Amino acid sequence: MIRHRELSRILPALSEMGVFTLVVTSGVIPVPPEWMKIPRQRVAISVDGLPEHHDIRRKPATYEKILKNIAGCEVNIHWVITRPMFERAGYLEEYVAFWSDRSEANRVWVSMYTPQVGESSAEMLTAENRATLARELPALAKRYPKLLFNDRLAKAFLHPPENPGDCLFAKMSANYSADLASRVEPCVFGGTPDCSQCGCAASMGMHMVRAVNVAAGLKVGHFIGASVKVGLLANRLKSRAARPDRWTPGAPRPSGEDVLVQIQP
């Protein structure tokens, strides 16, 4: 288990190495004010909708507790959008306006609910929901600068990577549980995510920039692809190199019996 005091020791060391870090938390316990002084360090708070939805899903990390625990800090707000949020007109802008008015919120970034293959739940977005977000969020971002969303990102959400092997973020990230030992595959979601309905903000961000032209017809995706191939070659030269499941077609999926690791204060 990782405790806040351990992170308070690890994060400055990573910063001194020039490593950029992002700590994502529910905000159920106070964010240490000293973390705000660490260079190349950012804290993100998961706030899944307005209180009517978030407080039910995230209890005991309710709005009341979050606002108390981030007082005096500067954090990013990570918003996972689910289908019930479309039941009331004006919901999207109400959420963005609330956090844009909070001095503690530095940026607001968006993910969409990502289901597992075969899942059927009330949280899953419809194709119409995704089209609505692609149309309305860029417009909201122009009125509320703290919201990180644009037309290119909207396009990426409408046309996500086909599978983990096609996802630059999955290829470039090594995902571990909170014990820093248990590998999470094939991507940060674990299990068997439905890539056709992926809503991961990081994945969509990488998917967006892969098509950016660099020079002479070369795009960002070409350079990243070459880098991944070099890494694979280096791994083959190691006797016990761990090959991520996402790069092995037909690799067995987790059994679902893995022990969850909780972070304690």
Image (spheres, rainbow, N blue to C red):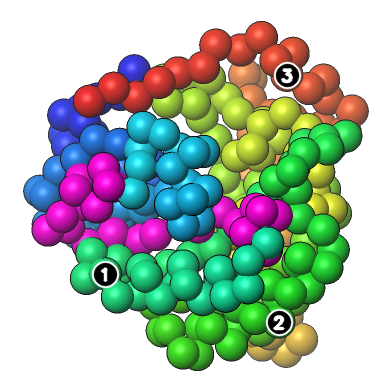
Magenta span contains residue 228 = no
Q: Secondary structure at mark 3?
A: loop
CB contact under 8 Å: marks 2 and 3: no
Which one is nearer the viewer's eye here, 231 or 253? Answer: 253
Residue 129, given in percent of the width and then of the height, sits at 76, 65
Please indicate whether residue 47 sits to the left or right of residue 200 in the image: left
Query: Disc 3 or disc 1, which is closer to the eye?
Result: 1
User: Can residue 228 be seen?
Assistant: no
Find the distance from the CA under tag 2 to the CA under tag 3: 36 Å
Which region shows up in magenta?
64-86
The disc label shown at residue 254, or none: 3
State the residue at coordinates (43%, 52%).
51
Which one is nearer the viewer's eye here, 124 or 233? Answer: 124
Q: Is residue 8 above or below residue 134?
A: above
Please indicate whether residue 108 sits to the left or right of residue 164 in the image: left
CB contact under 8 Å: marks 1 and 2: no
Where is the N terminus found, in terms of image quarters?
A: top left
Q: Is residue 238 above or below residue 86?
A: above
The disc label shown at residue 102, or none: 1
Residue 261, given in percent of the width and then of the height, sits at 45, 18
Residue 101, given in percent of the width and then of the height, sits at 29, 75
The disc label shown at residue 135, or none: 2
Find the distance from the CA under tag 1 to the CA under tag 2: 25 Å
Quadrant hosting residue 107: bottom left
* Residue type of the residue flagged with mark 2: Arg
